[in-house]
Image (cartoon, helix red, strand yellow):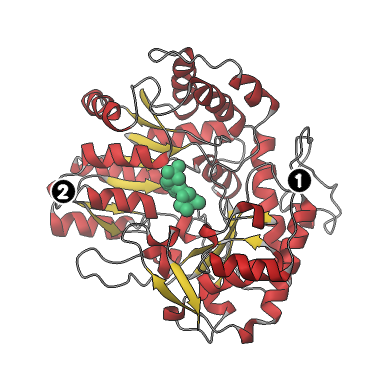
Amino acid sequence: MTTHLPQTTGRQLGRRSWAEPWKIKMVEPLRMTTPGERERALAAAGYNTFLLRSEDVYIDLLTDSGTSAMSDRQWAALMLGDEAYAGSRNFFELQEAVRAVYGYRHVVPVHQGRGAEHLISQIAISPGQLVPGNMYFTTTRAHQERAGGVFVDVIIDEAHDPASEHPFKGDVDLGKLAALIEREGAGRIAYVSLAGTVNMAGGQPVSMACARGLRRLADRHGLRVFLDATRMVENAFFIKEREDGYADKTVAEILREFCSYTDGAWMSAKKDSLVNIGGWLALNDEALFEEARGLVVVFEGLHTYGGLAGRDMAAMAAGIAESVDEDHIRARIGQVRYLADLLGAAGVPIVRPVGGHAVFLDARRFYPHLPQDAFPAQTLAAELYLDSGIRGMERGIVSAGRDPVTGDHHRPSLELTRLAIPRRVYTQAHMDIVAEAVEAVHARRGEAKGLAMTYEPRHLRFFQARFERL
Ligand code: PM9
């Protein structure tokens, strides 16, 4: 099969079209709602799309986490679940899949990504230590802070500019990191927290050159590098497309090489690995692994199930293998690009280049008349739901939360509304409908008045905060 991306331009360029490498075997009906029903549902949800009931949502682009469609092979694997309390066969399958695909030595299963973030933060951060990383992620930073760490952003400046066309906007600025080490001393740094396709920057990839350079810098100072591998398969795809010397390598080979520059990884398997629940922590260091294995039994469950059923681990092992299939990943990124191309052609401001798992609407340019204190990205998610029952998520000042020391809002330069696309779930026609809805909201953009926060939870406020209309 010859394939070219972006899919949308295939025909314009005179190439043959390209389609998803699967067909649909089971369907789930969608419910459409009336404008009045949506108005009532959103008001009851405090204008927070996280607080809507999913039955009131038509097309659900809240997240790509745990929302993917499993394959027939994954469903079949569920039936082969070994539900022994200890030593389940499925744990060994999972361990083997992680070793084969990611290349790490030791594997601790957890119920989802933040279970692993909790473990790595507790065992690798001492109170007061710094944790430099390529942009914060909400749950990751929350666990680092709860362990007494202080996150320091060392991503390249281009990542904070939604219009910059830099091909690897997820890269660590090695100069910034070197200066931090120089200023604070390597002993004050817990580890480097490196994430693939940086979520809060718009799903932006990290280059292999950066990973390699980071390894060299870390080695010079005796620092460890831990990877958030949640969407690393997508990252590997971007390296294949954009970085010299990788076009002829497989996504699986690129992934293995990238991971080889790191000392371990945490994983939310709910994304790349195509399962509805699950995750793992992988470590090369024996002593650190012993600590993680000791702690997992306190918070998640025995070290051979980590809060999961045997069948969950079986589906995860199968999903890991499917995730590095070239046609799968090409179609996955291709669908995100299809939506982005429609929106870009309609003049809707989006984060460029288009990332791996979502299209991010640039709420600052969408609603230039709204100050950040009126929560433009939250407003845009609300308006989109009201228009058509499509659910996205705020990724701006609300998600950024407050500085734990000063109590002030973090004020990120990126004020984004994310339309995350579940894997293998929606069709091209659904994407057309999403684009039409966003265009309709864009056409009425001058009418938006913004929101005020009426309830602010202490932890990860974006999940449960409530708002009212200004
Ligand atoms: N990400 C997402 O929608 C779900 C929770 S936040 C709305 O993007 C990264 C890069 C993630 C991530 C979750 C986690 C935590 C870690 N790293 O949700 O605990 O994107 O499995 O993973 C979400 P869990």
* Image quadrant occupied by the N terminus: top right
Q: Is residue 327 left or right of residue 359?
A: right
Q: Secondary structure at mark 2?
A: helix
**Amino acid type, residue under disc 2 in the picture:** Ala
Of the residues shown, which amino acid type is indicated by label 1? Pro
Q: Neighbour class for label 1 at 10 Å: few (<14), some, many (≥20)?
A: few
Indicate whether 272 appears above or below 91.
below
Pick the front one: 464 or 81: 464
Residue tagged 2: 186
Q: Which residue is mark 1?
A: 29
Is 104 rendered above or below residue 122? above
Mark whose residue sits in front, 2 or 1:
1
Q: Nearer the viewer, residue 171 or 30?
A: 30
Q: Does residue 271 appear left or right of residue 196 in this picture?
A: right
Q: Sequence-wise, which precedes: disc 2 or disc 1? A: 1
Q: Residue at x 59, y 22 (%)?
A: 78
Left or right: residue 368 versus residue 150 is right
Taking the spot 47% from the left edge, 72% from the top edge, the residue there is 467
In front: 2, or 374?
Answer: 374
Q: Position of residue 358 (x, y in %)?
A: 59, 55
Residue 84: image location, x then y, percent:
44, 13
